[in-house]
């Protein structure tokens, strides 16, 4: 049974898992007490949770609460439960629970490594996850990432269990996979990429079975169970939005905007013609609307000519005068974006997305830590820069180790499932205007499993193809 196998693994190496678990808690508690993070997004989630408890309205505002659907209900529901148990706006209690959840994620990642590689890999994956400061730091942030990573690991582990038990015809792993995936979607809309990845992989295996004449019924049934179970948690949310806003919205708006509010799509498209790193997200993108934009911080790649520079600076000066993007101003940004895309389509559709993906994967994940965004400038904050360089080196280490495990590590079962999710999510992230490094954290269960393959390798890797 699923749970019994996990217990057997722990019992066989009880002292190892005990000390590694204590280390995991120690690291996460360090971040909890030293670097707790309550961000602007945290207060949005918390406001929704508070109004949900006190007024029975899933909405934002003080005395005049307005229903909203700009955030999916997963994380507000979590905060509402915490507030109900420990007191209103008790964010530290939420962080303490997230520390426990993140420690549980380490066990899920270990079990995923056990199913896909070996027990030896499971122990390596557990240590890598337990001592990963990238995961630990976000356990101390009142954001959806920690829960999202947990349910991503749970869904992938259940998917591996379902593939493992195909000959037995068990449906419970597929049901668990679907429900975990649905919960991940309720936490963040991009959790839908997890569902697409799992269904795509099951479809690919089904095609291979059909080609070789093997039975398909159990695979197809498993895939259908995943789809149905993943959509079940979303139905109440969709029905609520249909009743409240008269539109069937299963997720949340792409730009987290209220119903019928103006979204400056032209400005966003213009940003994508030059955006390549997180620095510009903080300094330019997040300022619009509501805050002035310091045009001097625009990178040189934002202009193709002196004339274009003048037009851009004029538009930004018009914006700074009102701190609001009008439809006319937005149309001007859209025209500027169209001009730049026509001049360099490869830059817009290939090189910049690839650069954004690389920035999200390799940039130091210090957004919620006391480190300057321009970490490479050691003049103002040398300690923050050292912290950023350290975190950057740790991120590169984990990615490099995962690459080494993929290329030279032990064979990995269901490798196609893991890589499909990794690649699909990375490609999707490249399409965003705001390359935030935290968006790749959901991929870390896969990264850690791939890395564990390096520690489980034989001295001479066995010949033959890797099972997919």
Image (cartoon, rainbow, N blue to C red):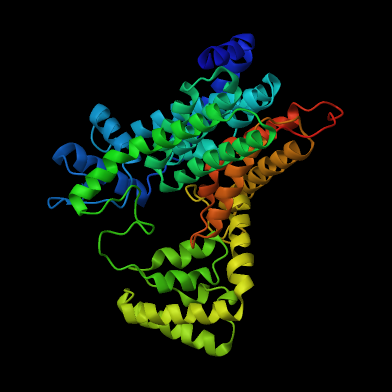
- Camera-side residue of 364 and 408: 408
Identify which residue is drawn at 50% across, 29% down: 222
Identify which residue is drawn at 30% across, 77% down: 322
Q: Is residue 187 left or right of residue 48?
A: right
Give the quadrant of residue 213.
top right
Image quadrant occupied by the C terminus: top right
- Camera-side residue of 344 and 394: 344
Where is residue 444? Give x, y as percent. Answer: 58, 39
Give the quadrant of residue 32.
top left
For this orientation, the residue located farthest to the right is: 460
Where is residue 368? Give x, y as percent. Answer: 47, 48
Where is residue 75? Give x, y as percent. Answer: 35, 39
Residue 256 visible in rendering: yes
Identify which residue is drawn at 64% across, 29% down: 214
Where is residue 286? Give x, y as percent. Answer: 41, 63
Q: Is residue 46 left or right of residue 305?
A: left
- Camera-side residue of 281 and 10: 10
For this orientation, the residue located farthest to the front is: 213
């Amino acid at each position: 049974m699923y749970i019994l196998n996990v217990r057997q693994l722990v019992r066989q190496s009880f002292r190892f898992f005990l000390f590694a678990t204590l280390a995991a808690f120690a690291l996460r508690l360090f971040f909890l007490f030293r670097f707790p993070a309550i961000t602007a997004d945290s207060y949005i989630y918390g406001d929704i949770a508070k109004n949900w408890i006190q007024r029975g309205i899933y909405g934002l505002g003080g005395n005049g609460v307005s229903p909203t659907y700009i955030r999916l209900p997963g994380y507000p529901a979590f905060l509402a439960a915490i507030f109900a148990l420990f007191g209103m706006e008790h964010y530290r209690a939420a962080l303490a629970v997230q520390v426990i959840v993140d420690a549980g994620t380490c066990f899920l990642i270990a079990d995923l490594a056990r199913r896909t590689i070996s027990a030896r890999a499971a122990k390596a994956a557990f240590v890598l996850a337990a001592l990963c400061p990238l995961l630990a730091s976000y356990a101390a942030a009142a954001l959806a990432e920690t829960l999202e990573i947990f349910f991503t690991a749970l869904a992938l582990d259940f998917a591996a269990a379902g593939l493992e038990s195909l000959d037995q015809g068990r449906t419970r792993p597929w049901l668990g996979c679907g429900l975990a995936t649905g919960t991940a979607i309720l936490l963040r809309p991009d959790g839908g990429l997890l569902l697409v990845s799992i269904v795509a992989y099951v479809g690919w295996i089904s095609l291979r079975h059909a080609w070789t004449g093997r039975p398909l019924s159990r695979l197809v049934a498993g895939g259908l169970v995943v789809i149905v179970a993943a959509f079940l948690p979303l139905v109440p949310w969709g029905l609520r939005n249909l009743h409240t806003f008269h539109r069937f919205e299963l997720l949340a708006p792409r730009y987290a905007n209220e119903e019928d509010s103006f979204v400056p799509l032209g400005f966003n498209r213009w940003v994508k013609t030059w955006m390549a790193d997180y620095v510009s997200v903080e300094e330019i993108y997040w300022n619009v609307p509501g805050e002035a934009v310091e045009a001097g911080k625009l990178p040189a790649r934002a202009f193709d000519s002196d004339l274009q520079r003048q037009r851009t600076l004029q538009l930004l000066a018009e914006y700074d005068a009102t701190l609001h993007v009008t439809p006319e101003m937005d149309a001007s940004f859209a025209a500027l974006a169209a001009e730049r895309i026509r001049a360099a389509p490869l830059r817009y559709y290939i090189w910049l997305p690839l650069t954004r993906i690389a920035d999200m994967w390799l940039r130091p994940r210090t957004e919620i830590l006391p480190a300057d965004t321009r970490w490479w400038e050691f003049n103002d904050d040398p300690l923050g820069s050292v912290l950023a360089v350290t975190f950057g080196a740790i991120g590169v280490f984990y990615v490099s180790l995962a690459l080494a495990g993929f290329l030279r590590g032990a064979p990995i079962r269901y490798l196609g499932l893991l890589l499909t999710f990794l690649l699909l999510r990375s490609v999707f992230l490249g399409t965003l205007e705001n390359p935030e490094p935290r968006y790749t954290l959901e991929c870390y269960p896969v990264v850690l499993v791939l890395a564990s393959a390096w520690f489980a390798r034989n001295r001479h890797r066995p010949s033959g193809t890797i099972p997919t």
